[in-house]
């Protein structure tokens, strides 16, 4: 992958944060995008306070990560439907990952942390849907974020074709409007595609998924805290540790293993970051929630089959 225009997978500095806001704003046609992105916006409103936005976004290879729970300068929470038109992208949210190829789509909730990675030049159609509007069709939309819907067949293919058709009319038919009936057809099809993918009980099942999403967001925001434990998390959300473990019982990792993996991943990125090359391995470990250098070295080697020093040297950086 080419050198990302934005700093990959790191807490955004003020300038980067502005660029990420520019990307989000470009995606829902609110303001001008950063220089490496291009969009042709069309903005329409349905009834009352339930707006729908559409934009076609172009990007060079880059990775974006947004960690805050609310985008500065944006009052309304939005859900962004990403429909891949050209190239491929990876969309991550709430421990899920959607790999999109042309025709595929997924949903991201911009009120919570998310990541999006373009491994090649891409073209993407983005539909911004307000929180209150999408909940008329999916009661708990947080439960379907970063779930991929294939656009090559079935209802997913119908949704993909329909969205592209609506967008083309926005571009080439000045009198065309995304009115209530078009919006109802669009979101009704999207919701139906997710019910077929996840099951008819999607609304009931995604309540637990919404709980998991909030907990994961809390973990991501507090990874650097060495006191972050399942007990602490349960106390914060006023649930028992038994119920906390039950919520994640069908996941591939336990809560504790997830916390450890994410800390190690962040440490590995820091060890190879040019901006961190003068920092000691111990200070990097302590900054990411580890309280023992010995423990950090042991678990790091267990995961990467290299000591932290060996890992750093492999990238020609010296401690």
Image: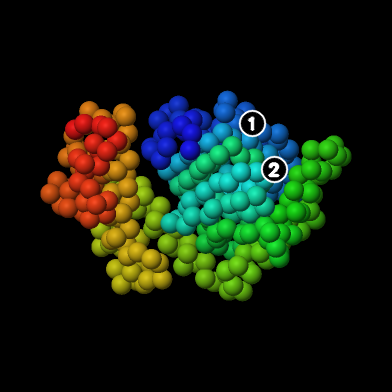
Q: How many numbered discs sit on the rendered protein?
A: 2
Where residue 135 appears, x then y in whole percent? 61, 59
Question: Cα distance, mark 1 to mark 2?
Answer: 14 Å
* Pair 1/2: label in front: 1
Instruction: Give the answer, above or below, for where 226 lies relative to 38.
Output: below
Residue 39, located in which quarter of the rendered image? top right
Visible in this render: residue 316?
yes
Between 293 and 120, which is closer to the camera in this rendering? 120
Visible in this render: residue 226?
no
Instruction: Residue at 83%, 38% (x, y): give it.
Output: 172
In the image: residue 75, left or right of residue 248: right
The secondary structure type at the circle numbered 1 is: strand
Between 168 and 48, which is closer to the camera in this rendering? 168
In the image: residue 128, left or right of residue 224: right
Q: Which residue is mark 2?
A: 54
Residue 276, located in which quarter of the rendered image? top left
Q: Tell me if mark 2 has few (under 14), some (14-19) or many (20+) residues whose alpha carbon lies within 10 angstroms of its own.
A: many
Q: Which residue is mark 1?
A: 38
Chain-order first, disc 1 or disc 2: 1
Where residue 165 appears, x then y in whole percent? 79, 49
Q: Tell me if mark 1 has few (under 14), some (14-19) or many (20+) residues whose alpha carbon lies within 10 angstroms of its own.
A: some
Where residue 62 appears, x then y in whole percent? 50, 36
| Quarter of the image with the C terminus in it | top left
Between 46 and 304, which is closer to the camera in this rendering? 304
Residue 185, located in which quarter of the rendered image? bottom right
Instruction: Residue at 27%, 32% (x, y): give it.
Output: 316
């Amino acid at each position: 992958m080419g050198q990302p225009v934005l700093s990959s997978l790191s807490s955004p500095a003020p300038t980067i944060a502005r660029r990420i806001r520019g990307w989000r704003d470009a995606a829902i046609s609110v303001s001008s995008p950063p220089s490496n992105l291009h969009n042709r916006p069309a903005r329409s409103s349905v009834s009352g306070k339930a707006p729908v936005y559409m934009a076609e976004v172009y990007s060079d290879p880059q990775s974006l990560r947004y960690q805050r729970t609310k985008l500065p300068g944006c009052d309304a929470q939005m859900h962004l439907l990403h429909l891949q038109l050209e190239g491929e992208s990876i969309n991550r949210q709430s421990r899920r990952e959607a790999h999109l190829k042309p025709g595929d789509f997924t949903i991201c909730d911009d009120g919570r942390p998310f990541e999006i990675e373009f491994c090649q030049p891409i073209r993407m159609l983005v539909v911004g849907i307000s929180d209150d509007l999408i909940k008329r069709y999916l009661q708990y939309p947080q439960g379907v974020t970063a779930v991929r819907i294939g656009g090559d067949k079935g209802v997913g293919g119908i949704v993909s074709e329909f969205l592209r058709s609506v967008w083309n009319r926005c571009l080439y038919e000045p009198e065309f409007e995304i009115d209530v009936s078009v919006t109802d057809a669009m979101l009704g099809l999207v919701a139906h595609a997710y019910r077929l993918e996840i099951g008819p009980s999607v609304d009931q099942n995604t309540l637990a998924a919404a709980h998991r999403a909030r907990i994961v967001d809390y973990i991501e925001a507090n990874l650097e805290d060495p006191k972050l434990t399942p007990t602490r998390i349960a106390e914060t959300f006023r649930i028992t540790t038994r119920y906390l473990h039950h919520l994640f019982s069908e996941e591939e990792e336990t809560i504790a293993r997830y916390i450890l993996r994410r800390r190690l991943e962040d440490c590995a990125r820091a060890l190879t970051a040019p901006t961190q090359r003068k920092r000691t391995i111990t200070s990097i470990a302590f900054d990411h929630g580890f309280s023992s250098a010995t423990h950090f070295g042991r678990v790091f080697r267990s995961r990467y089959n290299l000591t932290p020093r060996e890992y750093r040297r492999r990238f020609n950086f010296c401690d």
